[in-house]
Image: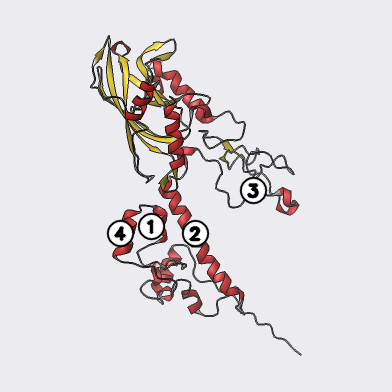
Amino acid sequence: MMEKLLETLCGKSREEPRSIGCGKKIKGRVVLKKKNVMDSTDIWASLLDRIHELFGKGVSLQLISAVHANGSRGKLGKPAFLENWISRLTSLSAEDDVTFDVNFDWKESLGVPGAFIVRNHHHSQFYIKTVTLEDVPGHGQLHFVCNSWVYPAHRYKYDRVFFVNKTYLPGDTPEPLRLYREEELINLRGDGSGMLKEWDRVYDYAFYNDLGSPEEGSDYARPVLGGSKEYPYPRRGRTGRRPNKKDPMSESRLPLLSLNIYVPRDERFNQVKFSDFIAYALKSLGQVLLPEIKSITDKTFKEFDTFQDVLDLYDGGVKLPDGHNLTKLKQCVSWELLHELLRSDGEKFLKFPMPDVIREDKTAWRTDIEFGREMLAGVNPVVIRRLEVKELYS
């Protein structure tokens, strides 16, 4: 027990590929990203993963032969675990990759592997990018492009399988891999039942039956779009949320500000895009609230009195500090959220970005050239209405 604990903490000695009986030691390299919170690595999740490693619950990979089958499935090699997970220090930046070594015992009689099974026995998910095998007997280097989130094994009812970076027509797929391919497609389609969770990988469709809020009254109810004989479309991604209490034909809706709507995990925003999204949301909130607060004390509520009122949406505001200190701060803290909030391109804090058409000339919007450009773009800048004046007579 103590020997195993020391091997886990200190790492096993790195061995060169060597012959083992009638087989060979294949060295592999796995590149992945750990679970993140916005722009940073999830430290708590990383700690829990290390605890799981101490109890022998690691991440295993098992090669599948593309040449020889056991029944209708390719023969499997021995499971191999990612090495030195505990001792490997990782960056706090969520964008940084982590590389782990893995060594497979592979019999040359099994031929060339064409896929592998990965089982994550950790507490948290990780994003596996690539797996590279060196000196594969009879082939050389093999490369697997994965680019997928792998959740703990107990979240799945099936094995996560990744295939070698080689395309086949359905009829040309090696027979030992054919059943794995077919099962993968079935898993991606789903069975059409149940509420989908974040770790599900289902690409299914449903009707637009979540447009209204019938629980608030008949005025807020909306018909189902799609599914009828006359109008079978449009369709949306299926989420499987429970039916609405007032209308069983409608699906219950998420709270207004909830971002927890189901999207297959591999299709959701990565940490860079999500940080941009949050930053733009925070900036937009300030840009909208400030004019709204000012308009409360305005006599002409929700109206512009002069053209200067329009320009004030872009001019003024808080000029963000710039210079050497801010540049050094951005270099030290590589958070996309911070970079977007502390823009250095002249954009003012709590103000809308200046439109290009009036960036250099504030009267350019009324030139014939700009009117012509907007007409060709379909904007129709000329909207003429008859002036109506209501006179009060005593």
Q: Which residue is mark 3?
A: 211
Say whether residue 163 is left or right of residue 305.
left
Q: Secondary structure at mark 3?
A: loop
Element under disc 4 = helix
Sequence order check, earlier mark of 4 and 2: 2
Q: Position of residue 206 (x, y in %)?
A: 60, 38
**Residue 328, numbered label:** 4
Q: Which residue is mark 1?
A: 339
In whole angstroms, how far apart are the C-alphas of marks 4 and 2? 24 Å
Q: Quadrant of residue 73?
A: top left
Question: In this figure, which colouring scheme has been used for the structure?
Answer: secondary structure
Percent position of residue 308, x then y: 48, 79
User: Who's the residue at 62% across and 32% down the image?
Assistant: 194
Label located before the other in sequence (4 or 3):
3
Disc nearer the start of the sequence (2/3): 3
Q: Earlier in the sequence, mark 1 or mark 2?
A: 2
- Indicate which label's residue lies in the foreground, 1 or 4: 4
How far apart, in angstroms, are the residues tagged by discs 1 and 4? Answer: 12 Å
The three-letter code of the residue at mark 4 reads: Lys
Closer mark to the observer between disc 4 and disc 2: 4
Choose mark 2 or mark 3, whichever is in front: 2
Q: Amino acid at mark 3?
A: Leu
The quadrant holding residue 30 is top left
Mark closer to the chain start, 1 or 4: 4
Q: Nearer the viewer, residue 367 or 210?
A: 210
Instruction: Tell me the amino acid under the disc marked 2.
Output: Leu
| Label 1 Cα crowd, 10 Å radius (few <14 / some 14-19 / many 20+) | some
Q: Quadrant of the C terminus?
A: bottom right
